[in-house]
Amino acid sequence: MRCPFCGNIDTQVKDSRPAEDHVAIRRRRFCPACGGRFTTYERVQLRDLVVVKSNGRREDFDREKLERSIRISMQKRPVEPERIDQMISGIVRRLESMGETDIPSKTIGEIVMESLARIDTVAYVRFASVYKNFQAADDFDKFVSELRPDVAPEDE
């Protein structure tokens, strides 16, 4: 593994342990050339996934991009980071086990929304506001009212 500080290709693993509920290996590394220490994560990748955007454009699946968007929606929510990591790993496993290498972005968005809805309603609404491109407060009202169909509208 190349050192991110000096570029040396001869780094040493100092410690390895399971991470993310045994879905990844966390490795602490040391560079003998510059003395730098850094952490890497190793995960199983079943297949290379390609995201097919709604406009037809294709791009390689990026786990970090998925993780960033989920973490933004979960910001300041009372959910443990380990639970978020497990959810992200579960989403990636689900995508990889679909049997297809080309996955529509819509499918990914729906799977993320489904996962967020089970963990935190506020994060679910936050993600949906970006995913569904809410333009006004009325969009939020309509979406939230669909979450609670058993609540009758107030009489005016």
Image (cartoon, helix red, strand yellow):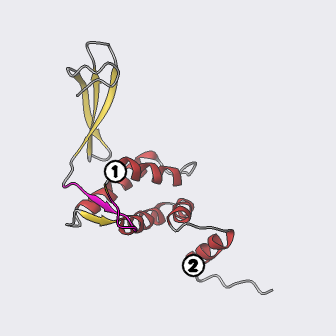
Question: Farthest residue in the bottom direction?
Answer: 155
Q: Residue 30 location in percent, x, y?
A: 28, 20
Could you tell me which residue is drawn at 63 percent across and 70 percent down?
A: 140
Location of the N terminus (image quadrant): top left
Q: Residue 144 location in percent, x, y?
A: 60, 73
Up the image or down, 156 lies above or below 69; here it is below
Which quarter of the figure has residue 55?
A: bottom left
Graded by Cα atoms within 10 Å as few (under 14), some (14 to 19) or many (20 or more), the crowding at tag 1 reads few
Number of marks in picture = 2
Which quarter of the figure has residue 135?
A: bottom right
Q: Nearer the viewer, mark 1 or mark 2?
A: 1
Q: Is residue 143 magenta?
A: no
Q: Residue 7 location in percent, x, y?
A: 28, 21
What segment is highlighted magenta in the picture? 47-58
Location of the C terminus (image quadrant): bottom right
The amino acid beneath tag 2 is Glu
Q: What secondary structure is found at the residue carrying circle 1?
A: loop
The residue that mark 2 highlights is 146
Closer to the chain start, of discs 1 and 2, is 1
Q: What secondary structure is found at the residue carrying circle 2?
A: helix
Residue 108 at least partly seen: yes
Could you tell me which residue is drawn at 34 percent across and 18 percent down?
A: 36
Question: Farthest residue in the right direction?
Answer: 156
Graded by Cα atoms within 10 Å as few (under 14), some (14 to 19) or many (20 or more), the crowding at tag 2 reads few
The amino acid beneath tag 1 is Asp
8 to the left or right of 82? left
Residue 83 at least partly seen: no
The residue that mark 1 highlights is 62
Up the image or down, 1 lies above or below 141; here it is above
Q: Is residue 52 magenta?
A: yes
